[in-house]
Image (cartoon, rainbow, N blue to C red):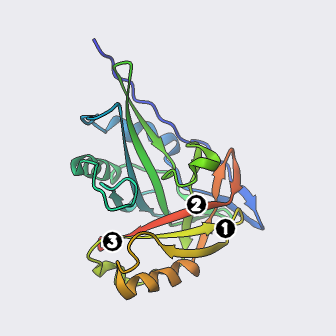
Amino acid sequence: MNYISKLVFCLSSLLPVLAFGQLHAPASFGSYADEFVSKLDFPNVSGGSTLTVKCAGRITDRGKFGTIICLDDPDFNGDSSIPRDVGSEIARMAQDVRVNPARVDGRRVEVWYNFSVRFQLKNGAEHIEIIDNHFRNKDNYGDNYVGAQRYNGDMSSCARNLRGAVFLQASISEGGEVQNVSQLGNSSSGGSCAGQLVEDMQSSAYIPAFFEGNPVASTYVEIFTKTD
């Protein structure tokens, strides 16, 4: 008889870290991860033993999801390979779960938070892991890091009218400075709105990525859709 264990792989007790004059503490599921994982059903993992779903959401300063989306396109390349019902369940369950809000200089701030949910079969047992990133910096830090988070900056309302998803990528320094914002994928996707969003991201403020408790430089990706 198979037994089911639901494991959580996350940084649960991040302490604020001083980075270039500001005290940064990113949002994370932390101690609330067990509650979230316990609500998820294990999906049918076909074609292998692992299914990873990338999700992102706006975390309010009260530690709640204000917006959440999960991708059926795990590599941002136009290929839909994740069953939509899996992402829908994650998004639905996350709406009722608290997370640790982000803080800058001790003040709670609203952030855009990238995370992944990995469903894995190990020796017949079902495991679910929460990972605080989208693996964009895997070559440098492996899986065990918290991705950068945008916390300040108004984004153009044109995103509400996008017909598809627009993925923007930026380089974020260990101090939270942003540079080299560009669009991933089809450069024509999003039209003039994509250009406006690039400018908005360039003028926003960021909490840097964290690895082993320290702020680090990273690549950051944000997803814009008509649901934002």
Q: Secondary structure at mark 1?
A: loop
Quadrant location, the C terminus: bottom left
Residue drawn 57% across and 48% down?
Answer: 138
Q: Nearer the viewer, residue 172 or 92?
A: 172
Q: Are marks 2 and 1 in contact (CB under 8 Å)?
A: yes
Q: Earlier in the sequence, mark 3 or mark 1?
A: 1
Q: Is residue 11 above or below residue 27?
A: above
First reached walking from the N terminus: tag 3 or tag 2: 2
| Dot 2 amino acid type | Ala
The residue that disc 1 covers is 176
Residue 86 picture location, percent across and down: 26, 46
- Residue 109 in the image: above or below residue 158: above
Tag on residue 220? none
Q: Residues within 10 Å of mark 1 (few under 14, many from 20)?
A: many
**x, y percentage for residue 22?**
73, 66
Three-letter residue code for mark 3? Thr
Q: Which residue lies under the disc numbered 2? A: 148
Instruction: Pick out the residue farthest to the left.
Output: 85
Viewer-closest of 76 and 109: 76
Instruction: Give residue 175's position: percent from left, percent from top.
Output: 71, 65
